[in-house]
């Protein structure tokens, strides 16, 4: 879906019939595009059947490229009215302009224009009532594309940072804790291995002391027996 701005340049008109019996007409134009409606200013008093507006009106436009020309989304409807002060405004004439080709060219080239051309005005009872000059232009809205690109880049950047932070958390989190745990286990094991020789040496010393004490007892007993034998 291509979005953009459709500009309508309302130039002037040359009409054949006058709806006012007294005085001259004061015309304005109501333009519809889809569900959008714009109203031009009222032409200057005294211009009658040759009103001049030289006014630009803008519409928001969307083009999908797969809908027929008759679709109301691509149709500009013009209704020329005569402003009356003391009664209901009079209908002067109408016309329809299809703009699907203009939108397609604007989508392909970046901008498309139709210089002011004369379009026939149909009055009441489908009678011819002169013509009106209208210029058209369509410019795709490039801002939406840039915003989407910026958002996608920002999204990628956020994902990259998030992914990077996850790596840092993993490498600095459970990995470092695992290494620290392994290191502590190693230190404890080393301390345990160093403690075992100390206990073994103490047991050996104790056995030697006990053996020494037993030797001293036997020596004393032998000396006692010798002294008794001499008696």
Image: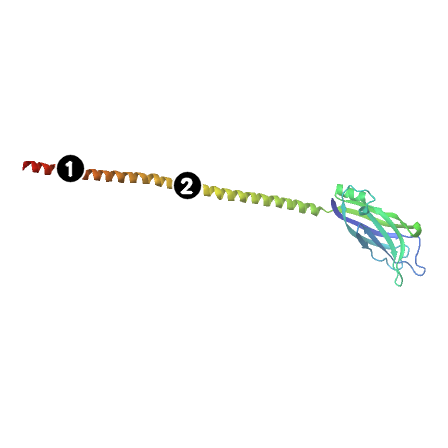
Q: Which mark is residue 183?
A: 2
Of residues 134 and 67, the one nearer the viewer is: 67
Q: Is residue 207 left or right of residue 3?
A: left
Q: Is residue 125 left or right of residue 63?
A: right
| Precedes in sequence: disc 2 or disc 1 | 2
* Quadrant of image for the C terminus: top left
Q: Is residue 66 above or below residue 34?
A: above
Residue appearing at x 64%, y 44% in the figure = 152
Quadrant of res 204: top left
Element at badge 2?
helix
Quadrant of res 161: top right
Q: Is residue 44 above or below residue 188?
A: below
Residue 1 position within the rendered picture, expressed as x and y whole percent measured from the top left? 74, 44
- In this rendering, the count of numbered labels is 2
Residue denoted by label 1 = 218
C-alpha gap between disc 2 and disc 1:
54 Å
Q: Contact, CB < 8 Å: mark 2 with mark 1?
A: no
Residue appearing at x 24%, y 40% in the figure = 206
Q: Which mark is residue 95?
A: none
Residue appearing at x 74%, y 44% in the figure = 2
Residue 220 position within the rendered picture, expressed as x and y whole percent measured from the top left? 13, 39
Of residues 154 and 172, the one nearer the viewer is: 172
Scheme of colours in the image: rainbow
Residue 151 position within the rendered picture, expressed as x and y whole percent measured from the top left? 64, 46
Q: Is residue 181 left or right of residue 100?
A: left
Element at badge 1?
helix
């Amino acid at each position: 879906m291509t979005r953009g701005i459709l500009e309508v340049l309302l130039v002037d008109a040359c009409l054949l019939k006058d709806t006012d019996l007294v005085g001259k007409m004061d015309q304005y134009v109501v333009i519809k595009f889809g569900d959008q409606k714009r109203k031009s200013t009222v032409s200057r008093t005294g211009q009658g059947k040759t009103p001049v507006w030289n006014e630009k009106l803008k519409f928001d436009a969307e083009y999908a490229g797969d809908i027929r020309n008759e679709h109301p989304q691509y149709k500009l409807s013009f209704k020329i009215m005569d402003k009356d002060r003391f009664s209901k405004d009079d209908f002067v004439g109408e016309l329809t302009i299809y703009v699907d080709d203009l939108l397609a060219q604007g989508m392909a080239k970046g901008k498309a224009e139709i210089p002011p051309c004369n379009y026939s005005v149909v009055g009441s009872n489908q009678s011819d009532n002169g013509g009106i000059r209208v210029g058209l232009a369509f410019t795709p809205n490039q801002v939406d594309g840039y915003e989407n690109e910026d958002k996608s880049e920002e999204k990628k950047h956020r994902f990259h940072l998030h992914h990077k932070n996850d790596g840092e958390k993993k490498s600095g989190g459970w990995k470092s804790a695992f290494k620290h745990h392994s290191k502590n286990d190693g230190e404890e094991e080393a301390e345990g291995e160093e403690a075992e020789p100390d206990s073994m040496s103490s047991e050996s010393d104790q056995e030697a002391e006990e053996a020494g004490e037993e030797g001293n007892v036997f020596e004393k007993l032998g000396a006692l027996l010798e002294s008794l034998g001499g008696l």
